[in-house]
Amino acid sequence: MTTNIEAVVPAPADALRSRSLAALTWRRLFKQRNAIVGMAILLFLTLVAIFAPLLAPYDPVQSLLGIETLKEREAPCIHILGCPEDKPQHIMGIDANYRDVFSRIIYGTRVSLFIGFSTIGMAVVVGAVIGAVSGYLGGWVDNLIMRLMDVVLAFPSFLLAIAIITVIGRGLQNALYAIAIVNIPVFARLVRASVLSIKEQEFVSASRALGASNLRLLFVRIFPNALPMLVVQATLSIAAAILEAAALSFLGLGAQPPTPEWGTMLGSERNQVFTAPHLVFFPGLAIMLTVLAFNLLGDGVRDAMDPRLAQVAKK
C-alpha cells in the first residue's frame, strides 16, 4: 500500500507558511506611510466611484443649455464662497458643451478605475501564463516566446498602443485592449524569471520525485512563489495604464465624447488653458491624484514584501 507523502506532510506546512507570510506582509503594509496614504486616497476614489449617482448633482453627459441660463465655460460657482444664491451652483464650473464639470469628474473616477483594473488584469493573466509556461518548459519554446516578447518590448509602449488602435479602430474598448497588449511582455518576463530560479530549488525536485505532475509543479509549487513580485508590478502598472488611457483619450484615440473620461475632458478644453484654466486644472488634478495613489501603494507593497528594500532606503 502506497502513501502520498506529499499530500500528507508538505501541503499543510506550505499552507501554514503561506498564511503566516501573508499575515506578516499585511502587518508590514500598514507600517508603510506610503501605502497608508495610497490606500486612503484609493478608498476615497473607490467610494466616489461607487456613490457617483448620489454625489453628482447633474447628469455627466447632459447639456444644461436651455435648462439654465448659462454662459459658455462659466466659472465655478460656490454659494458658501460668495456666489449669488439665485445662481445655480456649479462647484467646478461649466464646460464648452454646457455640462457640469464636477459631475463629469465624479463619473470619470468610475471610468479611470475600470480602465486601470481591467487592462492590467488582462495583462497579468495572459502575461503570467505565458511567462510561467515559457520558463518551465525552456528550450525552443522559451526562445520563441521570449523573442516575440522582445519584439513587443522593442517599441515604445505608448507608440505601440497608438499603432494598435490605428489598426483596430478608436474607442475606449479598443484602447483597453491596446494598453493590455503592450503590458503583457512585462509580466511575462517577470514571471519567467521567477519560474527559472524557483524550478531548480529542492522543494520542487522533491515534489517531482514524489510523482507530482507538471501542471501541479508549475501552478501549485512554483507559480505561487512568483506572486509577490507580480503583485508589486501590477499595482505600479495600474497607475501607468490610467495615465496611458488618459493620454490616448487626450489625442482622441481612447474614450470618445461625451464619455466622462478625464483625458477626454483635457483634450476637449486644452485650448482654454488661459481663458478658462479650471476646465483643464480639475481633470488634470484627478489624474495626478489617482496615479499618485497607485504609485504610493505600489511602493508600500514592495517594501512590505521585501523589508530589505526599506532598510536600504533608510540608509
Image (cartoon, helix red, strand yellow):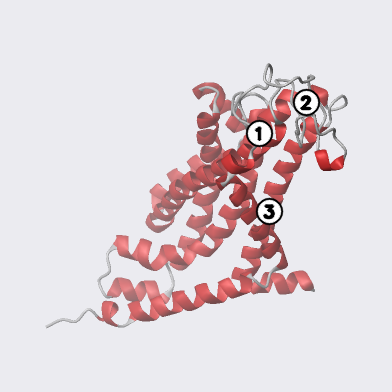
Which image quadrant is residue 166 in?
top right
Q: Which mark is residue 18?
A: none
In the figure, 224 relative to 92: above or below? Answer: below
Q: Which mark is residue 270?
A: 2
- Residue 145, image x, y percentages: 44, 45
Looking at the image, is mark 3 or mark 2 earlier in the sequence? Answer: 2
**Which residue bears the numbered disc 1?**
104
Crowding at mark 2 (Cα within 10 Å: few <14, some 14-19, many 20+): some
Q: Are marks 3 and 2 in contact (CB under 8 Å)?
A: no
Crowding at mark 1 (Cα within 10 Å: few <14, some 14-19, many 20+): many
Query: The disc labelled 3 sits on which kind of residue?
Result: Ala
- Residue 132, image x, y percentages: 42, 55
Of 22 and 86, the residue lying toward us: 86
Which residue lies at the image location 47% right of the left edge and 67% below the top edge? 225
Left or right relative to 33: residue 222: left
Name the element at disc 1.
Answer: helix
Count every numbered label the image shows and give the total: 3
- Residue 302, image x, y percentages: 63, 64
Which image quadrant is residue 311 in?
bottom right
